Image (cartoon, rainbow, N blue to C red):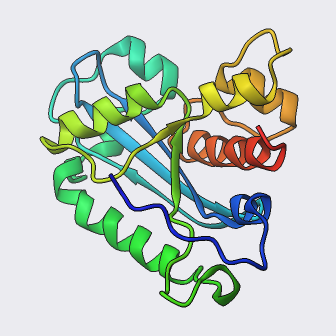
Amino acid sequence: MQRIPRLPRRLSRTEIGVATPIVGIDVETACPTRGAVCSIGISVVQRGLVVGERHWYLDPGTRFDARFIGIHGITPAQVAGAPRLRAAWSDIDAFLSTTLAALAEPSLFDAAGDGPSPLFVAHNAQFDRMQIECALGRALPFPIACTVAMSRRAFPKLERHNLAAVSAHLRIALKHHDALSDARASAMIAHRCMSSGA
């Protein structure tokens, strides 16, 4: 378990929460096979603003199911020549490291150089985590918070808490089942939930 950083005295916990970098992650899959990731989107949000994001098409390592193509619109032709997730992970890691390093705010760091760790989120995080870990063949080195659970706490009167419903409620633009759009929406939902104090 990661050590929780000590908070500076001049900022409240709410202010730290709002300033925490939020990393939204979403994957799309080619078929029901676990780990058949054909697309991953990552969006980094801080203080309610997108500060970095990327999308990768990936070779799922298996056939595409027509039903899944119908959901996300990704075809075998679009991923032709793309790497598997395991091969692309070093590029993803480099993107995250560079983007997060650029966000270091002196006001958020204490004398020991500690600051708020990024919060990784996904809508229905268990699904995305399982797919990524199956594709990588190993566990992720960070937890992923679930924005479904966060939105249930923050907006208990909402009838539904799926990504489309919560995004519509918060007026967050969404092109559903586009990995980058879903990742961005998840990060924005987390920001709004944290800003609400939930």
Q: Looking at this view, is 134 or 10 the one in front? A: 10
Relative placement, left or right, of 52 versus 64 is right
Relative placement, left or right, of 170 versus 81 is right
Regarding residue 76, the answer to whether it shows in the image is no
At horizontal 39% and vertical 33% (from top left) the residue drawn is 128
Residue 11 drawn above or below residue 119: below
Residue 50 drawn above or below residue 80: below
Q: Looking at this view, is 20 or 30 the one in front? A: 20
Residue 128 drawn above or below residue 5: above
Relative placement, left or right, of 2 versus 15 is left
Q: Please tell me how many numbered marks the rendered image carries.
A: 0
Q: Residue 37, image x and y in percent?
A: 30, 36
Q: Quadrant of residue 160?
A: top right
At horizontal 29% and vertical 32% (from top left) the residue drawn is 131
Regarding residue 19, the answer to whether it shows in the image is yes
Residue 38 drawn above or below residue 69: below
At horizontal 55% and vertical 90% (from top left) the residue drawn is 111
At horizontal 67% and vertical 77% (from top left) the residue drawn is 8
Residue, far front? 9
Q: Looking at this view, is 11 or 33 the one in front? A: 11
Q: Residue 94, image x and y in percent?
A: 34, 73
Q: Residue 81, image x and y in percent?
A: 21, 52
Q: Quadrant of residue 198?
A: top right
Q: Residue 89, image x and y in percent?
A: 25, 58
